[in-house]
Image (cartoon, rainbow, N blue to C red):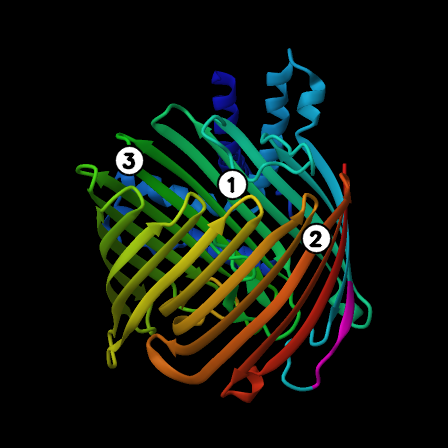
Amino acid sequence: MKQKFLTFLLFTLTGFLTAALEHFTGLPRIIPKTPAFRLGMKAISNLKIKKSPVLKGGDLRGLLCRSLLRLTPYALRVYVLPSAVCSMLLWASSFAHADIGDFLSKFQPYITVQEEYNSNINLAPTNRKEDYITTLSPGLRFSTLPRSAITGEFRQVPTAEDKFGMDLDFRAGFVFYAKEEDYNYIGLNGLLNAWYLLSQRLSFRVRDYLIRSDEIREADFSATAIPGQTLISRTITREPYYRNVFEPSVEYRFGRENTIGINYRNNIYEIKSQLFEDSMENYINPRLTYWFNIRNGISLEYGLTFGDFQRSPDLVGHMGMGRYTYRFNPKTSTFVEYAYSIRDFEPPSIDYDICRPSIGLEHAFSPTLSGKIQLGYFWANPEKGSTLDKPYFDIGLTQRAEKANYALSFQGGYTEDYFTAENLGFTQYYRGIGSVNYRLLQRMTVGLFSSYEWAKYYRFLIETRQKDHIWAIGGNTSYQPFRWLTLSLEITHRENHSNVDTADYSEYRGIFRVTATY
């Protein structure tokens, strides 16, 4: 147990230590840095944090905070996933007296060949370009979770018995366009989840998401996103971008349902473009949940955001949220919530704050079916200009069963689009998303998904002309004729009807995929 804990700590700290050695001794870096990246690192080294008394102070606390913020980007850029590989190799020593075959079974190499047809690769309103895109993706997965006896796949969610573990999936994609050969590129996709339960009370978790892609509309990278959900921001042409999101967290449980913890997120976005810009987010999020008795509980949360942008004014953000929950019974509870956010930009941008009170109800219809409804109102107050006030709602229904999984989500109010290609900022929106997946046979699944989104854009709460109506529909199926072979097909259609002609588009795409797994 001690050796596993040390391995886990080594995994989380190796990146930071290596980056520190590199920073102070001048060791060569693993990946050559582009001019844009060097510019970003210079911005981090000169991070404007004067608005925080602790971070600007000359005392030890200020020095430590500044040092962490400066070293973190070096470490997370290239060392997190390699550190995970080192952790896997060190973990192998724990099997010195066990069956080596059991250890090797935790590795799952695979290769995927994908053929895609796209009717409008740049999502252009006119002069559309269609193309056939071939992708060859070798990959490797390492997981401490047990495999299914039927499909050979690893179990998706750890149980309470999994005190320590890791689930790492990494693949490279060699992408070839049949017509637009200048668009050929190498993509990357990695996902890491690691956890260690030091005791029944104290737990450590690490999540890392890595992608290099040229998708016009980027997939939503949040852990709670529904499959098929995308960000509002988009690019104009096929320009490869890079994103790495690193999220460690610590949680301490001091009662049956009482917890205190802290999350940290480092979100790096880079794109080689004259129209769009690189950005970096550092987010610190302490939180507390406390139940006075079986029926009455509170949740408190705070978020501190440091936003660095290549050309746009930098951002310091604050978020405070409080919730009181009353539980009628183990299945049903109601709550009252209040959230307040402050967005403080460098001049000449306009600062603003947002107030959002709401009430809600949560109910578990069965062990696999649950629902939520939350209704409220928000006021967005810019430093200059008029206040924007609109209703807010979040309604969801989720079914997770052995054969059928489905999710329905209806949301409305506002979102904030930062650390993306366009950095659209404050956006009023209404959205509906649905997805259904059903297992017809032990080795065959089918799925459907659909989405609709209405978006009205504001720039620092100054209304712009553009309004978009974006909808999409699609279906997919997957069949595993052999334990080592998987065939899948996906067909989608997406359209945007905008009052700005250059934002209109229509796209059809079909993807056939063959995956061989060892």
Q: Is residue 189 left or right of residue 321?
A: right
Residue that label 2 marks:
478
On the question of residue 165 being in view, the answer is yes
Secondary element at image label 3: loop
- Which amino acid does the dot numbered 1 rest on? His
Going from N to C along the chain, the mark reached first, 1 or 3, is 1
Q: Residue 503, relative to residue 155: is it above or below?
A: below
Q: Position of residue 244 (x, y in %)?
A: 54, 51
Q: Amino acid at mark 2?
A: Ser
Could you tell me residue 275's position as x and y percent? 56, 74
Say the numbered circle drawn on residue 257.
3
Q: Earlier in the sequence, mark 2 or mark 3?
A: 3
Which residue type carries mark 3? Answer: Glu
Kindly check if marks 2 and 1 are in contact, taking CB atoms under 8 A apart as contact.
no
* On-image quarter of the C terminus: top right
Q: 10 Å neighbourhood of mark 2: few (<14), some, or many (≥20)?
A: some
For numbered disc 1, what is the local secondary structure? helix
Judged by depth in the image, the label closer to the viewer, 2 or 3, is 2
Q: Is residue 36 left or right of residue 376?
A: right
Residue ID for mark 1: 23
In this view, the residue in front, 234 or 358, is 358
Q: Which mark is residue 326?
A: none
